[in-house]
Image (cartoon, rainbow, N blue to C red):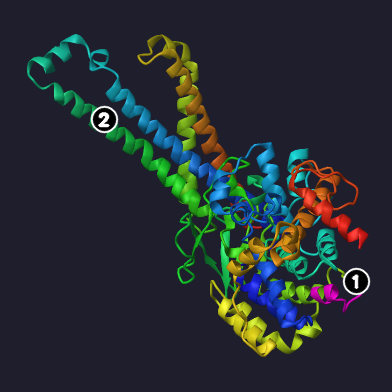
Amino acid sequence: MQKDFHYFAACCAALLAGWSLEESLEIAAADQMADLCSRTFLDKVKGPMSAATTQMQLELMQARTDLIGLQDITRIWASFHFLPGDLTAEPPRKTGKRYKQKYRLICQPNGPLVKDTVELAKGKGTAAAGLSMHVLADTWAHRNFAGTPSLVINNTNYYFYEIIDGKDETITFRHSPGAPDDLEQRLYTNSIYQSSENSIMNLGHGRAGHLPDYSFIRYRYLPAWADYNEIVKDNPAEYWQAFCQMVCALQYLRGEREVFETGVYAYDTVKPWEDEIRAILEKRQTDACDDWQALGGKIAGQDIPDLDVEKLQTEYMAAAPEDRDGTFLGAFFLAALAQKSMVTNKIFSSGNLLAGWSVDFSKEGFRGIGDFWKLVEASRKGAES
Amino acid sequence: MNNDRERELRRQRSTLRSLALGITVFGLWSVLKAAVTAFLIPVEKMLDEETLAFFTESGMRYVIYIILLVVVLVFAAIDLIPRFYVARKARRESLGQNPGKAWMVWALVLFVIWAAIDIAEIIFFPKLLEQTSTGRLDTIISLVLDITATVILGELCLTAFRIRKIESGEG
């Protein structure tokens, strides 16, 4: 998913869930920030480095792929963009431990971790709510790929067809990072084939290009892990479900629903806007920002402004160090640390060391290390108040 | 569609595609080997003194290289054309297109010829080792690679037959 869904569509979802425009914009900003908060950004604003929610292309190119480096990559990508669907999943065939651990990191919607993610954001403000919406929405877009570099899980092959009007059309993948995708010629950019299992080229949906991020596209392909079973991905239908689930989760976070259950969607709430939303989702375009922005304007009754990262940055950097956690970015960093700590801990607790050794930093009383100490302090403050 | 038949068909087609690539790569390797043998081994080792003296004294030593080039090109044509034909048709088969049946007969014929050559090589291996002009290790490696290429071609034929069987509903 891209800015169109992570910012403008998230704003629409928050508005429909009953949040005010100001709150909805904050939720949308936090949602989009998950794609911007890299170590480069954190270094610039002097934020806690462990709060990184993404890695820029240059950072990935420089990333180490030894054990420690892979665990760092996995913590970031599995926590925020490829939330594992089932940490106890069993591969259909008997396999080795290493394969099984990677298989269990495959992202799927409606897993137990989605519920944990939304519940973790409850009562933590708009920044945490927005971040959890990013994670939730990506479980739909990025399903069937894992947030760890792995050829045996994330690779795709020549069997890749776009379904247009019910017919299979061949897709041409190229490795040309600078060139935009050509929808007319069905020329899409993907990461280059690397036979090394842990190559950074085999991270997430790199081998399938940006296809999972486009709401309009329908395609079928053979994932490396599925033993020659093809997967038909219907993005318009799945993005619709993602949107309705976001509204449902945001209603819960706002206190309108008692509990958040996976597999429950706010179809009734979204019903009045269904035709317009489905029309945007079906429209063949690489960037739907304008359409979602216009829809947000209709729902809110006023224009939806674009995300102003500079403003958030200035607010954070201008605040005194002890007041920074009270700014929007400060709250976002704390939410990111909490989410990363929770997911890493769940992966570790399941007996899987791909995200590294973990302690539950959000639990009060633990003597934290490094900049996760910030999270421990915040938890203590929360417990005292 | 994800029933057992479709899944098996995809698996066999994927295998066939890899095998077709193997046939092509081995073809390129054999031509490269022929070119290296022809041009890197000194002509003094290939020709007897009398013949060499004839070409050298008449100032036509370059003719030796022209002849070698022609020999390599003819060898390349004889060796590569059937390989590329089989590999190309197998690739089409792997994509679910219908390249006909003739290519499978040719693949089988090629397999029989290669297998016969390999058997002959094995039988005369001690002699080949004695008479080698490029070294014993080279002879051993050549034999191993030739057998590997034949196994790949055999597997390609089997896979193609399996695909046809599944497609006809027998598999």
Numbered disc in front, either 2 or 1: 1
- The chain ID associated with circle 1 is A
The crowd level at tag 1 (other Cα within 10 Å; few <14, some 14-19, many 20+) is some
Start and end of the magenta stretch?
A: A250-258
Observer-nearest of B130 and B136: B136
- Find numbered disc 1 in the image and state the secondary structure of the residue it sits on: loop
Residue at image position (61%, 86%) is: A303
Which numbered disc covers residue A173?
Answer: none
Q: Which residue is mark 2?
A: B71
Q: Is residue B74 magenta?
A: no
Left or right of A82 on screen, residue B145 = left
Q: Quadrant of the C terminus of chain A?
A: bottom right
**Residue at image mark 1:** A259
Q: Is residue B160 visible?
A: no
The percent coordinates of residue A131 (x first, y second) are: 73, 65
Amino acid carrying mark 1 in the image: Val
Q: Amino acid at mark 2?
A: Val
Give me the residue at 24% from left, 27% from top: B68
Quarter of the picture containing the N terminus of chain A is bottom right
Residue beneath the point at 45% across and 38% down: B25
Residue A278, above or below B39:
below
Check disc 2: other Cα within 10 Å, few if <14, some if 14-19, many if 20+.
some
Name the residue at 14% across, 21% down.
B61
